[in-house]
Amino acid sequence: MTFLIDYLAGILIVIGAFFTLTASIGLLRLPDLYTRMHAASKAGTLGSCVVLIALAVHAQDVAIATRALAGVAFFLLTAPISAHLLAKAAHAAGYHLWPGSVRDEMAGGTRNDKTTQS
Amino acid sequence: MMSGESFLGFCVVVALVVLCISFLLTVVRILRGPTLPDRVLGLDMLVAVAIGFIAVLGIKTGFSFHVDIAISLGLVGFLATVAFARFIMSRKADPELPPRREPRSPWEPGR
């Protein structure tokens, strides 16, 4: 049973590390802020969450496993919020999409731009 | 067939090397910019990579307080990103930014 847990934890940390590598390659190669945000906020968060799940599997203690799973829930909740907030702030400040973008739904500004500018 | 211990040790080494490479790639993006939101996004990604590092080290060494460090680092990274987003929203885009360019290829590397 112990060697099964070791195998599962090892496979999970390698998967998480490669997700993180994918995210950083996307961060380096993609053309503008809004496309880089896809790589960083999805693959990056998934990478660290999978490694934390591996820690929860490997820990022989309920307290450590619970804390690791609480950390996973926390990152899954906060990563979309921070990415969305950063994208909205950058768009409101006037950073352009790259020229290959098909359409910009917020090009004319949204109705509540005036209220969020404060 | 390897034993569980040696397989886990091998996986820890592989994961640490891969995380080092992704850490360096993220640092390259932070140094190259070109704009402030790109750097903020790179710092956010750096926090995610650091959490992965801490979790792998927690598996390797078996210390339980690594999880608490990871959670608090994630909280600090989230608050930093929110504060930077408010800061970016309160000021306009850099005037020295080059104007829109013609697309060359979909896989053109960033400036």
Image (spheres, rainbow, N blue to C red):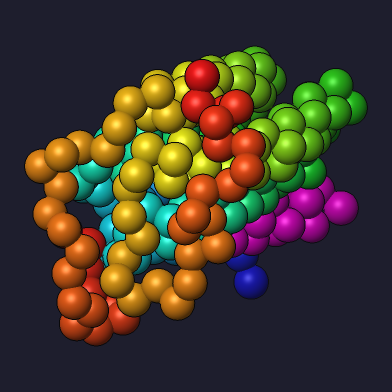
Of helix, strand and loop, which mostly describes the magenta segment?
A: helix
Q: Position of residue A66 (x, y in %)?
A: 85, 28
Magenta residues (range): A1-15
Asked whether, in this view, residue A68 is left or right of residue B40, the answer is right
Q: Position of residue B8 (x, y in %)?
A: 59, 51
Q: Position of residue B57 (x, y in %)?
A: 52, 33
Closer-to-camera residue (B4/A83): A83
Closer-to-camera residue (A23/B40): B40
Please say if B30 is above or below A117.
below
Asked whether, in this view, residue B24 is left or right of residue B99, the answer is right
Closer-to-camera residue (B95/A62): B95
In the rendered image, residue B83 lying in the magenta stretch gets the answer no
Work out which residue is located at the far bottom of the displayed protein and give it: B105
Please say if A13 is above or below B70.
below
Q: Position of residue B46 (x, y in %)?
A: 40, 37
Asked whether, in this view, residue B80 is left or right of residue B78, the answer is left
Say which residue appears at 50% left-offset and 26% top-offset. A117
Q: Is residue B25 visible?
A: yes
In the rendered image, residue A2 lying in the magenta stretch gets the answer yes
Say which residue appears at 58% left-offset and 47% top-offset. A110
Write down the quadrant of residue A70 in the picture: top right
Please say if B50 is above or below A13.
above
Say which residue appears at 64% left-offset and 60% top-offset. A11
Q: Is residue A58 visible?
A: no
Write down the quadrant of residue A97 in the picture: bottom left
Closer-to-camera residue (A3/A45): A45
